């Protein structure tokens, strides 16, 4: 069920997929362009304590790597595939980005970027 996010993405020419089969599992959210240029893989982890949000975001990025969610997009020759882990509690979240997984060739060793929202 995509609802408002799916409609908003469609207006901008972006495909929105929930629980999409990728690699060795199902990623929470996929946003990708119809022209095989750019894709975003978002993995979300909910925790009860705000202090645990960053660790949850890190766990989410580890899952993106371990389950090889980017492989489908890499094999389709996407130029940019971003992996983003989000840990959230209540109305706050921490995000960790793996960056462009295509440029890194080995997404397991990518440098992570952190953000708090």
Image (spheres, grey):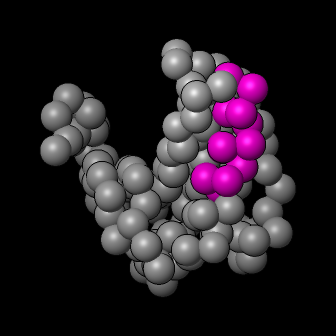
Q: Horizontally, is 114 left or right of 90 in the view? A: right
Q: Give the quadrant of residue 86.
A: top right
Write the residue at 20% across / 29% down.
4
Q: Is residue 22 above or below residue 84?
A: below
**Residue 93 screen position, x and y as percent:** 61, 26
Q: Give the quadrant of residue 94.
A: top right
- The quadrant of the picture occupied by the C terminus is top right
Q: Is residue 77 above or below residue 52?
A: below
Q: Is residue 58 magenta?
A: yes
**Residue 13 screen position, x and y as percent:** 26, 45
Write the residue at 68% across / 62% down.
62
Please state which of residues 2 and 31 is positioned toward the viewer in this rendering: 2
What secondary structure characterizes most of the magenta part?
A: helix
- The quadrant of the picture occupied by the N terminus is top left
Please state which of residues 13 and 21 is positioned toward the viewer in this rendering: 21
Write the residue at 51% across / 51% down.
43
**Residue 85 screen position, x and y as percent:** 61, 47
Please state which of residues 61 and 35 is positioned toward the viewer in this rendering: 61
Please state which of residues 12 and 91 is positioned toward the viewer in this rendering: 91
Kindly give the residue lying farthest to the top in the view shown: 91
Q: Is residue 6 above or below residue 25?
A: above
């Amino acid at each position: 069920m995509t609802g408002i996010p799916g409609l908003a993405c469609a207006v901008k020419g972006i495909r929105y997929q929930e629980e999409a089969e990728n690699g060795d599992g199902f990623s929470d959210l996929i946003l990708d362009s119809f022209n095989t240029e750019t894709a975003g893989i978002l993995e979300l982890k909910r925790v009860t304590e705000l202090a645990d949000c960053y660790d949850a975001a890190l766990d989410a990025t580890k899952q993106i790597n371990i389950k090889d969610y980017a492989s489908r997009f890499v094999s389709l020759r996407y130029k940019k595939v971003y992996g983003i882990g989000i840990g959230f509690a209540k109305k706050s979240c921490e995000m960790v980005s793996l960056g462009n997984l295509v440029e890194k060739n080995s997404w397991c060793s990518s440098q992570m970027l952190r953000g708090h929202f």
